[in-house]
Amino acid sequence: MSEKTFKIVGNDISDGYHTFDELIEYGKAHNANMVDGMPWSFEINGRAITHENNDCYLITTLEGVMKFKRGEMLIIGVNGEAYPCKMDIFEKTYEPVKERPHPNGECLDRQSSIFCSECEKAISEKV
C-alpha cells in the first residue's frame, strides 16, 4: 500500500494532515477552553484533545491516548480517526500533491477528486 500523496487541508481540520500550529488555531477558533492564550481542551470529530504543555497535546486515538508534539503532523483519517505522526516518518511516507496547470479552468485532477487551489475555491463558493 502506497500513501505517497497528501494535501494540507488548512481551514478544515476534520480530515487531512495538519501541523501543531494548525491544531492550536483550530482550538482557538472552536471555543476551546483557553489558558494563558493556549487552547486547553477541545474535540475534533468527537475525539478529545487536551493540552499537556505548550509543545504537546494529548490526542485520543483508536489505540488510546497519544502525544502530539510540535514538529509532528496530525493525521485525520477518512473515518475521523486522529493520530500523530513523527515528521521523518511523514516525509518518508507522503509527498505533496502537485498542482498542475489546466486549460479553460478545468482541473486535470478532477477524476481523482484532487483539485488545484483555484478550482477548490470555485467549488467551495458554489456550495
Image (spheres, helix red, strand yellow):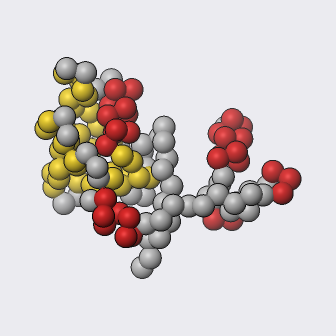
Above or below for 81 versus 13: below
Q: Tell me how many marks there are.
A: 0
In the picture, the quarter occupied by the C terminus is top right
Pinpoint residue 67: horizontal percent, then vertical percent.
Answer: 17, 50
- Which image quadrant for residue 78? bottom left
Pinpoint residue 41: horizontal percent, then vertical percent.
Answer: 21, 31
- Which image quadrant for residue 54? top left
Residue under the image location 36 percent in, 46 percent down: 19
Residue lying furthest bottom? 1
The front one of 81 and 29 is: 29
Relative to 28, 12 lies left or right: right
In the picture, the quarter occupied by the N terminus is bottom left
Residue under the image location 71 percent in, 47 percent down: 119
Residue under the image location 23 percent in, 40 percent down: 49
Residue lying furthest right? 104
Residue under the image location 66 percent in, 52 percent down: 116
Relative to 55, 101 lies left or right: right
The front one of 126 and 98 is: 98
Residue 27 appears in the figure:
yes
Residue 123 appears in the figure:
no
Above or below for 57 versus 109: above
Relative to 57, 108 lies left or right: right
Pinpoint residue 9: horizontal percent, then vertical percent.
Answer: 49, 47
Pinpoint residue 76: horizontal percent, then vertical percent.
Answer: 37, 53
